[in-house]
Amino acid sequence: MNTLKFNNHDEMPALGLGTWRAAPGQVKAAVKAAIELGYRHIDCASIYQNEAEIGQAIAESIAEGRVTRRELWITSKLWNDAHAPEAVEPALRRSLDRLQLDHLDLYLIHWPIAHRQGVIFPRRGADFVSLDALPLAATWGAMEALVEAGLTRHIGVSNLRAEALLSLIDGARRPPEVNQVELHPYLQQPQLVATCRAAGVHLTAYSPLGSPDRPADLKAPDEPILLQDPTVMAIAEAHGASPAQVLIAWSLAQGHAVIPKSVSPARLAQNLAAATLRLTAKDMAQLGALERGRRYVTGAFWALPGSPYTLEGLWGPR
Ligand code: A2P
């Protein structure tokens, strides 16, 4: 398995397991099956509300001798209501308790969006705190302290556009090492990718399959279905592979880490096997031509009336 390398010589397996929307009741079995199949990178977040089950799966897999803690790469993310510097370490400790771990490999600021403490999903403008009042740099200072305390080996961000990433790097003692963002052939984000490369920030691609099981209220009525794209399907057929495997192989070929979500053992195995699918230069050119700026996770839920956040502020001008 390819890995992404860090300055301290740690290596993150490039292909990981996504757990957003992996439902309680399903996710423990899925994580155990994934580890058994050979997954060594599990992507978690406090807001997915399934860390306790993932923790059980990890603990049981270790106790059964299937894997060691050192072989695993576990990521989690700070939720938006815990950006206040004094709230950061307690939030990480709650994730560690649920995951039954004494440290994470990677902890990310989930969104450049702050809520009032205790507001999980904002419903009105007053539920937010602006980044002027609670700058990301202040949250970042508390993230840096987590590395120094040995609670996580690496820190990073998620959903940051290039300008926000560069300004965070400017004031950082420990620059972010990863930016986890939506990336797939319909949203290739070339400017962000170039910025991250130049700054030595790894990218992890989320929603690499186009996140087809998002709740209906997060879907646009007319949205194209990435897994059914005719070009993706034709390339898959030519390789005797599945469309999902082509999409995963595309991310890996770009040098990104990629975290397809599945709770089905058959699809977990299929997705892992994508690591050995070699796309040709022609395949890559055809996939490259699919770019259409299609964001499936739009962030519209942060741009409620009265919110200090706008989609343009989040992603930049369209
Ligand atoms: P399931 O969990 O039932 O396997 P993304 O990673 O872009 O968020 O997409 C995850 C969605 O894609 C889930 O609905 C997942 O369903 C589905 N999925 C995962 N792997 C495959 C695959 N190999 N083929 C088709 N659908 C898949």
Image (cartoon, rainbow, N blue to C red):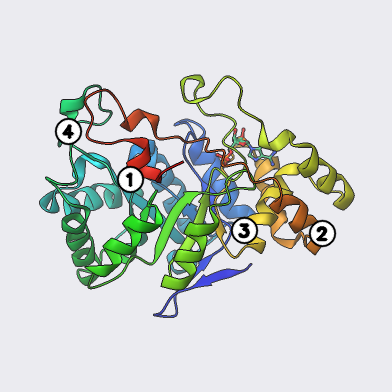
Residue 39 falls left or right of residue 318: right
What residue sits right under mark 1 in the picture?
111
In front: label 1 or label 4 = 1
**Label 3 environment density (alpha carbons within 10 Å; few <14, some 14–19, many ≥20):** some
Q: Earlier in the sequence, mark 1 or mark 2?
A: 1
On residue 38, the disc is 3
In front: label 3 or label 4 = 4
On residue 282, the disc is 2
Q: Earlier in the sequence, mark 3 or mark 2?
A: 3
What's the residue type where badge 3 is placed?
Gly
Quadrant for ligand 1? top right
What's the residue type where badge 4 is placed?
Gly
- Compute the Cα span from label 2 to label 4: 50 Å
- Compute the Cα span from label 1 to label 4: 16 Å
In front: label 1 or label 2 = 2
Report the front residue among 316 and 151.
316
What's the residue type where badge 2 is placed?
Lys
Q: Earlier in the sequence, mark 1 or mark 4?
A: 1
In front: label 3 or label 1 = 1
**Label 2 environment density (alpha carbons within 10 Å; few <14, some 14–19, many ≥20):** few
For disc 3, does the CB lie below 8 Å from ligand 1? no
